[in-house]
């Protein structure tokens, strides 16, 4: 049998809201993943590993706890994903021979895709399977329990599971699959809104869409600019931030310059050379504006979801 581990312990700081509880077609983003995994016949038990803000999330999903689903809390989640994997494989019974590691922010992976990946894993003579889409590795990852327990100390080290996969290619079957869903994990708010919109349209459902911005003589700052700053802060590079949203470097610079002119202060500054190499970093005012906007968006999002459920829950899924 296969034991599934659903990793949902992260803070999701790049999203700016509690992404596990984001609305997703009438349920939360995390519930969508849980529901699809629980439909799988070859999964004996699903272990949902929480961490940041665990009590609030657990309260929302506690009705899942039964013989096939168990909720665990990883107190050491801030030390990395490997700590959640270790938590998930604790106290396994001897009947469990295989482990499936899935991510709680990949709601586009459905039962059919999960099943396809599992069937391929069981049909090949390798100890681990990693799905790949156009050269990019994704999830879920399937691995023999014996191998995972034997190598868990190495996975605990720098790079975690990603480094293990890189160092042990002879043990891994890289499953080339034409399904972009395996590499789409929702790290940013604009990604969430984009794929939620696509999901609603695919199901011919209504959805509530909205944007916020600060305005003076025209738009000064809003969702889009905030999400760019979040990426700059994450990558330490305007160029990489632009690439992540398919924007040219010159377009990104023009946008930042326009924002800075309208705001009257610098948002980023170049970092030249040094040990970490060149790049970009947020100024003190730029970081404060980003964090204040993220906090605002987090609070207003919670209120909007409450109002959406109150006024439109009976309408959104009617064709």
Image (cartoon, rainbow, N blue to C red):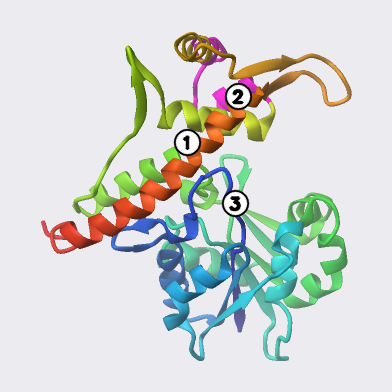
* Mark 2 neighbour density, 10 Å: few (under 14) some (14–19) many (20 or more): few
In the image, which disc is placed on residue 263? none
Mark 3 and mark 2: span between their CA atoms? 36 Å
- Relative to 128, say whether 275 is above or below: above
As helix, strand or loop, the secondary structure at mark 3 comes to loop
Q: Looking at the image, is mark 3 or mark 2 earlier in the sequence? A: 3
Asked whether the beta carbons under mark 1 and mark 2 sit within 8 Å of each other, the answer is no
User: Which residue appears at 42% of the width and 55% of the height?
Assistant: 108
| Horizontal side of residue 115 vs 86, given as left or right | left
- Residue under pointer 2: 285
Q: Position of residue 214 (x, y in %)?
A: 37, 26
- Tell me where the magenta segment starts and ends, as one range: 237-254
Mark 3 and mark 1: span between their CA atoms? 31 Å
Magenta stretch: residue 116 in it? no
* Rendered image quadrant of residue 139: bottom right
- Residue under pointer 1: 293
In the image, which disc is placed on residue 138? 3
User: Which residue appears at 44% of the width and 61% of the height?
Assistant: 21
> Which sits in the foreground, 291 or 106?
291
| Horizontal side of residue 167 vs 132, given as left or right | right
> Which sits in the foreground, 15 or 112?
15
| Horizontal side of residue 171 vs 102, given as left or right | right
User: Which residue appears at 63% of the width and 66% of the height?
Assistant: 51
Q: Looking at the image, is mark 1 or mark 2 earlier in the sequence? A: 2
Q: Nearer the viewer, mark 3 or mark 1?
A: 1
Q: Position of residue 82 (x, y in %)?
A: 74, 62
As helix, strand or loop, the secondary structure at mark 2 comes to helix
Asked whether the beta carbons under mark 3 and mark 1 sit within 8 Å of each other, the answer is no
- Relative to 212, say whether 256 is above or below: above
């Amino acid at each position: 049998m296969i034991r599934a581990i659903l990793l949902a312990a992260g803070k999701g700081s790049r999203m700016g809201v509690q992404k596990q509880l984001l609305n997703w077609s009438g349920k939360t983003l995390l519930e969508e993943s849980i529901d699809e995994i629980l439909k799988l016949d070859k999964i004996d038990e699903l272990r949902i590993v929480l961490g940041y803000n665990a009590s609030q999330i657990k309260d929302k999903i506690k009705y899942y706890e039964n013989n096939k689903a168990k909720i665990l809390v990883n107190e050491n989640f801030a030390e990395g994903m490997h700590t959640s994997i270790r938590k998930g494989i604790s106290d396994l019974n001897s009947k469990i021979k295989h482990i499936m590691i899935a991510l709680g922010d990949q709601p586009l992976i459905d039962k059919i895709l999960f099943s396809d990946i599992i069937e391929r894993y069981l049909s090949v003579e390798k100890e681990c399977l990693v799905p790949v889409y156009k050269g990019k590795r994704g999830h879920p990852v399937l691995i023999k329990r014996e191998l995972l327990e034997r190598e868990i100390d190495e996975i605990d080290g720098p790079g975690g599971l990603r480094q293990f996969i890189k160092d042990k290619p002879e043990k891994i079957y890289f499953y080339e699959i034409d399904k972009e869903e395996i590499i789409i994990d929702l790290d940013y708010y604009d990604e969430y809104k984009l794929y939620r919109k696509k999901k609603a349209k695919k199901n011919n459902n209504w959805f509530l869409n909205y944007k916020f911005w600060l305005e003076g003589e025209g738009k000064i700052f809003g969702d889009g600019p905030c999400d760019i700053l979040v990426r700059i802060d994450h990558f330490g590079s305007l160029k990489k931030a632009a690439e992540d949203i398919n924007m040219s470097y010159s377009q990104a610079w023009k946008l930042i310059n326009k924002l800075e002119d309208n705001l009257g202060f610098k948002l980023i500054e170049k970092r030249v050379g040094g040990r970490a190499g060149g790049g970009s970093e947020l100024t003190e005012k730029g970081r404060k504006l980003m964090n204040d906007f993220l906090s605002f968006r987090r609070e207003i999002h919670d209120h909007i979801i409450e109002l959406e459920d109150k006024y439109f829950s009976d309408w959104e899924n009617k064709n």
